[in-house]
Amino acid sequence: MGLFSNKISREEVKPGDHIYSWRTAYVYAHHGIYVGDNKVIHFTRGGGRQTETGTFLDKLVVSSSPNYPQCLVCKDHSSFNGDKVITSCLDCFLAGGNLYLFKYNVSRSSFLAKPRGGTCTLAPSDPPEDVLVRANFQLHMDGWFGDYDVTENNCEDFAIYCKTGLLVCKKNRFGTSGQVNAAAAASLALALHACGLSMLGVGVYCYGRVASDVSRNGDVIKVPAKKLVSILESDRTSPREGWLSIAGPKFRGE
């Protein structure tokens, strides 16, 4: 695994790792948490759709995705309506693609050296046991993690939450997804380039990526894994009610 590639082998992946796989044409990466025993917990749309933006991106991702048949167990898990956190085997999660490891606590130079967002973060990861508590807790809520939104609440946001405990707590804010925030920074940089301000555009892109990283986001709250354990052990509230009480107004619809 080098500076410019996070690709790893199956033998290297460990429980609590944040993994991802690029879909065909490298347009979009799907993210999840490896929990051991060849299983991955990840946030997806009903029927296995990861995007629904109302733009060309939907058609491009769906049409370019490999026609990879799911195993019988995963096929049953993915036959639902709405948005849900589910468990899949590693093969079905990868859908024929390669396996990549999302990196945490990278240096600023390494962060900016990555050719695109959605592969690493400046933020440190919590211990693997905390990561697994958060990932499995969502299954106790019947897979609920709010409405899937490609810019505000997607599979990368879920995986980063599991690893760090950080959630964007305000509505109408981009989530923690590096893919989305890098695309927003790139759009502004391209606009400046079109105006003949190429060097300024490069600076804006670099600044935008760093400033929008989850480690720099002032609109996040921390969800301690210990708090989730106490919710599960309590008989006074349901897992969903307990989680919503600490997850912030965005998830409560406020």
Image (cartoon, rainbow, N blue to C red):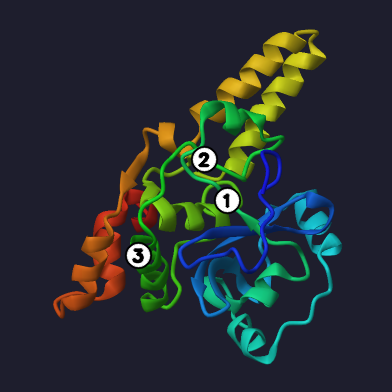
User: Which residue is under mark 2?
Assistant: 121
Ranked by sequence position, the earlier of labels 3 and 1 is 1
Q: Which mark is residue 129?
A: 3
| Front residue of 98 and 217 | 98
**In the visual, does 249 lie left or right of 215?**
left
Q: CA distance from mark 2 to mark 3?
A: 20 Å
Q: Secondary structure at mark 2?
A: loop
Residue 231 x/y as whole percent: 21, 70
Q: CA distance from mark 2 to mark 1?
A: 8 Å
Q: Label 2 crowding class (10 Å Cα cut-off): few <14, some 14-19, many 20+? A: many
Taking the view exactly as shown, the residue that stands out farthest to the bottom is: 72
Residue 223 x/y as whole percent: 29, 54
User: Which residue is under mark 1?
Assistant: 102
Q: Is residue 43 above or below residue 216?
A: below
Q: Secondary structure at mark 1?
A: loop
Q: Amino acid at mark 1?
A: Phe
Q: Amino acid at mark 3?
A: Glu
The residue lying at 42 percent from left, 67 percent from top is: 135
Ranked by sequence position, the earlier of labels 2 and 3 is 2
The reply to whether callout 2 and callout 1 are in contact (CB within 8 Å) is yes
The reply to whether callout 2 and callout 3 are in contact (CB within 8 Å) is no
Residue 230 x/y as whole percent: 18, 69
